[in-house]
Amino acid sequence: MCVLTETEIRKELESGRLRIEPFNDDQIGAASIDLHLGDELRLMPAPNGPVHLQGNCDLNQATELIKIRDHYVLEPGAIVLGITRERIYLPSNLCAWIEGRSRIARAGLMVHVTSGFVHPGVANHQVLEMSNIAGVPLAIHPGLRVCQIVLERTEGDAVYRGEFAQQTSP
C-alpha cells in the first residue's frame, strides 16, 4: 500500500472514482484532504449508571444527538461523537485514515480515539471520536477544518458492507 500525494489525489478526483461532497480544491494538501466538522454531535448524557459494552451494543440508546447552532463547549476530559460535513466515496482499491490536524491537536482536541481507519468502497460521512485533552474548555464550531483524510491504494479490491457503510449521522 502507498499513500497518495496531491497529484494522485487530483487524478482520482478528476476520474470520478474518488468523490468528496461537498468539496473545494483548497482542501487538498501535499498528501491529504482536509475535512470539516458537520453540525451534529452525539453526547453521553450525565452518568446514570454504567453503559454496558457487550456484543453489538447500540450506543444510540445511551447517547443524545444534538445540532450545533454556533458552537459547542467541550469540557476537559470529555468525549463527543462528531461527523464530517463531507461525504466520502472511496473506490474499491482505496482505503484511508482519518488523522488530526496539527493546529487542532496543539489546542488539545483529539479527533479520533482509536478508529481512524476508513474501509475501501465506503460512501459515508466519517464519525469523529473527539476528546478534549487540554486543561481548558474548547469551543468547537461547525465548519471547522477539524481533520484530514490520508488515502492509500490497497492490494486487491474490497468493499465495506458493515453496519456503518452508509452513515450520515454520528
Image (cartoon, rainbow, N blue to C red):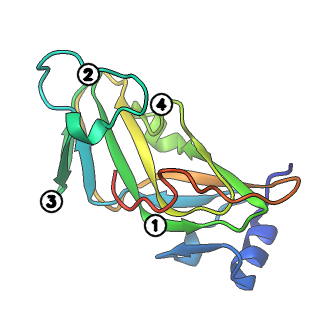
The residue indicated by pointer 4 is 113
Point out residue 69 in the picture as x, y percentages from the top left corner. 15, 59
Q: Which of marks 2 and 3 is nearer the N terminus?
A: 2
Circles 2 and 3, Cβ within 8 Å, touching? The answer is: no
CB atoms of marks 1 and 2 within 8 Å: no
Nearer the N terminus, badge 4 or badge 1?
Answer: 1
Mark 4: give few (<14), some (14-19) or many (20+) Cα within 10 Å. Answer: few
| Three-letter amino acid code at the position of disc 4 | Val
Per the image, the residue denoted by label 3 is: 69
Determine which residue is flagged by label 1: 86
Q: Which of labels 4 and 2 is toward the front? A: 2
Q: Please rate how many residues cluster around mark 1, counting C-alpha atoms within 10 Å: few if below 14, some from 14 to 19, many from 20.
A: many
Among numbered discs 4 and 2, the one appearing first in the sequence: 2
Q: Where is residue 144 in the image (x, y as percent from the top left)?
A: 37, 56
Distance between mark 4 and mark 2 Cα atoms: 18 Å
Viewer-proximal residue, 60 or 5?
60
Separation of marks 1 and 3 at Cα, in angstroms: 18 Å
Q: Which residue lies furthest to the top in this view?
A: 49
**Earlier sequence position, callout 1 versus callout 3:** 3
Q: SS at mark 1?
A: strand
Horizontal side of 27 relative to 18 (left or right) equals left
Q: Which amino acid does label 3 sit on?
A: Arg
Residue beneath the point at 59% across and 77% down: 25
Number of callouts? 4
Q: Nearer the viewer, residue 49 or 110?
A: 49
SS at mark 4 in the image: loop
Q: Tell us which disc is closer to us: 1 or 3.
A: 1
Image quarter of residue 15? bottom right
The residue at the point 49 percent across, 63 percent down is 124
> What residue is pinned by disc 2?
51
